[in-house]
Image: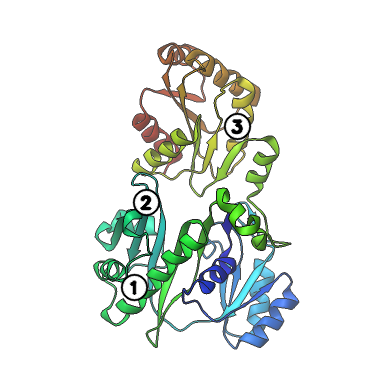
């Protein structure tokens, strides 16, 4: 379950993470006007949607006056940001920013623990920083045995220091990181991210933004996370809602390579190889144990309906479902869907995989590209997506 910014800040604040003074949640322009009058003179008007890139899309605006806050709200309400319509705006007092940093903690699937990422280069896409200047990004795996009693402050200080934070804020940033780790554990989150983490002109360190993903499997420990279900605020991405109605295991992501596989573990691995090939996945879709034409058609139709998707990586390991059945299911699904501009890069492995690949090669469907390995398929899908 993803939270929007203001919810993430509420979660941070109650766990001791420093955040700006409380803002106001608004669902009308009149409410924005009242909030700006109360919190001004200078405020920031922020769209509240469960996706990144809000600033680039025009969903975050600084308003030097209440009148400008109203104008900003009029342009932001109803704005479409990566398929998310803005129904809620958060207005908060503008902060005096001296510098911007990056800080996050996520579950480490490979190491079975946590991964802390810190950088002095904040306020921009951390993936871009990692690509252009990898030395500016510190990645620190943490084992559960090392954090049984919380994140040690000495460990936090070491991470912050290696990330080259200014000496004046190392202690404050380390304390905030300790609190952020505590919030992640207490709230059963799988991701907590602050971008930007800011140093104010009086040398305080605060979370100016938030990105939080909660583990739905732990909802029973938190009254079903009902406190975060707010009327008027989107419950999920529209495609996720459609997938839920159709019984499809689908999560919308921010990239351009559609990902479809059989089994959660295989799909997670597919996301990783797409990233290693220099691309970003547009979704997580697990078709489960079957690969019939019906399942393929429904799943592909869902993935292809995302305008962000420029190519699709279909990664299937045949077990009980044989490779020739998978290949025929894919071809029949393509015929049912008709013409579509994206290419499907298909990697088959497992039972009768060679027969399945032979069927795809013989069919020579114009929308299907066959690949022998995961890495080959990922590279081709990323290339076709123009990523």
Q: Secondary structure at mark 1?
A: helix
Q: Secondary structure at mark 2?
A: strand
Q: On the image, which quarter does residue 371 sit in?
A: top left
**Pointers 2 and 1 in contact (C-beta within 8 Å):** no
Distance from disc 2 to disc 1, alpha carbons, whole Å, reads: 20 Å
Single out the mark in the foreground, 2 or 1.
Answer: 2
Task: Look at mark 3 in the image and give the residue it sits on.
Answer: 299
Horizontal and vertical percent position of residue 367:
52, 25
Instruction: Identify which residue is drawn at 39% across, 34% down.
Output: 378
Q: Relative to the observer, which residue lies in front, 168 or 123? A: 168
Identify the disc placed on residue 64. none
**Which mark sits nearer the N-terminus, 3 or 2?**
2
Could you give the CA–CA distance between mark 1 and mark 3, rounded to whole angstroms? Answer: 44 Å
The quarter in which the C terminus is drawn is top left
> How far is disc 3 from disc 2 in space, using C-alphas?
32 Å
Q: Position of residue 48 (x, y in %)?
A: 61, 64
Residue 48 as seen in the image, left or right of residue 282: right
Q: How many marks?
A: 3
Neighbour tally class for label 3: few under 14, some 14-19, many 20 plus, Cα within 10 Å:
many
- Identify the residue position indicated by label 2 in the image: 113
Looking at the rendered structure, the secondary structure element under dot 3 is helix
Q: Residue at x 62, y 26 (%)?
A: 295
Q: Label 2: few (<14), some or many (≥20) within 10 Å?
A: some
Q: Which residue is mark 1?
A: 174
The numbered mark, 1 or 3, whose residue comes first in the sequence reads 1
């Amino acid at each position: 379950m993803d939270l929007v910014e203001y919810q993430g800040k509420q979660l941070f604040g109650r766990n001791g993470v420093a955040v700006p003074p409380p803002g106001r949640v608004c669902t009308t322009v009149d409410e924005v006007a009242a909030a700006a009058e109360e919190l001004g003179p200078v405020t920031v008007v922020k769209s509240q949607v469960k996706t990144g890139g809000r600033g680039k899309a025009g969903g975050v605006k600084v308003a030097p006056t209440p009148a400008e806050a109203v104008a900003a709200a009029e342009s932001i309400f109803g704005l479409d940001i990566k398929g998310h319509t803005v129904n809620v705006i958060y207005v908060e007092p503008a902060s005096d920013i001296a510098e911007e940093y990056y800080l996050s903690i996520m579950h480490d699937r490979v190491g079975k623990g946590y991964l802390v990422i810190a950088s002095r280069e904040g306020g921009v896409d951390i993936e871009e920083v990692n690509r252009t200047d990898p030395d500016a990004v510190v990645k620190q795996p943490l084992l559960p045995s090392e954090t049984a009693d919380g994140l040690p402050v000495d460990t936090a200080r070491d991470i912050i220091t290696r990330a080259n934070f200014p000496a004046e804020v190392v202690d404050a940033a380390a304390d905030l990181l300790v609190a952020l780790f505590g919030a992640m554990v207490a709230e059963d989150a799988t991701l907590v991210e602050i971008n930007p983490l800011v140093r104010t002109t009086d040398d305080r360190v605060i979370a100016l933004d938030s990105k939080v993903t909660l583990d739905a499997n732990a909802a029973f420990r938190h009254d079903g996370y009902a406190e975060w279900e707010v009327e008027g605020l989107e419950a999920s991405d529209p495609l996720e809602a459609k997938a839920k109605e159709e019984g499809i295991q689908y999560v919308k992501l921010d990239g351009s390579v559609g990902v479809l596989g059989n089994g959660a573990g295989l799909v997670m691995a597919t996301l990783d190889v797409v990233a290693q090939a220099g691309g970003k996945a547009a979704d997580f879709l697990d078709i489960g144990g079957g690969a019939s034409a019906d399942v393929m058609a429904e799943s592909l139709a869902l993935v292809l309906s995302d305008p962000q998707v420029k190519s699709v990586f279909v990664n299937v390991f045949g077990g009980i479902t044989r490779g020739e059945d998978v290949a025929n299911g894919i071809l029949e699904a393509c015929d049912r869907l008709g013409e579509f501009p994206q290419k499907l890069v298909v990697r088959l492995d497992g039972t009768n995989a060679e027969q399945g690949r032979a069927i795809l090669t013989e069919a020579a469907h114009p929308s299907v590209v066959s690949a022998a390995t995961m890495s080959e398929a990922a590279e081709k899908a990323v290339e076709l997506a123009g990523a």
